[in-house]
Amino acid sequence: MEWLTFVAEIVKALAWPAFLFFTVLVFRKPLVELLPGLRRLRIKEFEIEFGRELLQAENRVRVTGRAAVADRLRQISAVAPTAAILEAWRDLEAAAADAATRRGFSVTGGAWELFEVLRSESVLSEAQASAVDSLLRLRNKVAHAADAEITEEQAMRYIEIAAALAAALRGAS
C-alpha cells in the first residue's frame, strides 16, 4: 500500500508541471506571436490586450514623434495615465468634429458615427480608420475597467497615436 501512495503523490506533484509543459508545447506558435507586443504580463487579459492593440494602432498610423503631443497631456500622463488617455481621445474626437464641420457633414450620433462618416467620405484612410477603431476600443476598456493599470509609457504611446490622427484630421482639406 505504501508503494501505491508513493506513486499517487508523485503523480499529484507532477500533474501541474506536466500540464503546463503540454500546454506550452501545444500553443507555442501563438505564444511566440504574442511575445513581440508583450510589455508586461498580468493574469487578467487586459494588460496583454492593451499592449497588443497599441502596437497594431502604431503600425497603422505614422507617429511623427513626441513634438505633436500637448504638454498638458504629458503632465497628465505622469500623474494619471488613465485620465491622459481619456483626454487624448477627447482631443481626437474634437479634431474629427472640426474636420466634419469644415466639410459640411452633419453628424448627430456619437463618436462611432462621426468617424464612420469621415471614413466613408475618404477623409480618413482605411489604416487611419482602423487605428481609430483600436483607440476607441482601448479608450472604452480604460473608461469602464475599474482595475485598469495603465503605465505612463502606455498612456504616452496612446497619446502619440491619437495626436498623429488628430493632426492628420486638422491638416486634411
Image (spheres, helix red, strand yellow):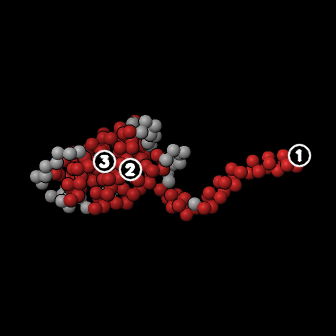
Q: Residue at x 39, y 36 (%)?
A: 80
Whichever of callouts 1 and 3 sits on the residue coming sooner in the sequence is 1
Asked whether the residues under the numbered discs 3 and 2 touch, taking CB atoms below 8 Å apart as contact, a structural biologist would say no
Asked whether the residues under the numbered discs 1 and 2 touch, taking CB atoms below 8 Å apart as contact, a structural biologist would say no
Q: Quadrant of the C terminus?
A: bottom left
**Relative to 71, 147 lies left or right:** right
Q: Which residue is mark 1?
A: 2
Under mark 1, the amino acid is: Glu
Dot 2 falls on a residue whose secondary structure is helix
Confirm whether residue 68 shows in the render: no
Spatial CA distance of label 3 from label 2 is 10 Å
Work out whether 105 lies above or below 25.
Answer: above
Dot 3 falls on a residue whose secondary structure is loop
Spatial CA distance of label 1 from label 2 is 60 Å
Residue 28 horizontal/vertical position (percent)? 58, 61
Under mark 2, the amino acid is: Arg
Q: Give the camera-side residue of 10 and 136.
A: 10
**Relative to 81, 104 lies left or right:** left
Q: Residue at x 40, y 36 (%)?
A: 79
Residue 60 horizontal/vertical position (percent)? 34, 60
Q: Give the camera-side residue of 152 and 92.
A: 92
Number of disc labels: 3
Q: Which residue is mark 3?
A: 69
Q: Which residue is mark 2?
A: 157
How crowded is the residue under tag 2: few (<14 C-alpha within 10 Å), some, or many (20+)? many
Spatial CA distance of label 1 from label 3 is 70 Å
Q: Residue at x 60, y 62 (%)?
A: 26
Work out whether 92 lies above or below 32.
Answer: above
Quadrant in which residue 143 is drawn? top left
Dot 1 falls on a residue whose secondary structure is helix
Work out whether 78 lies above or below 124.
Answer: above
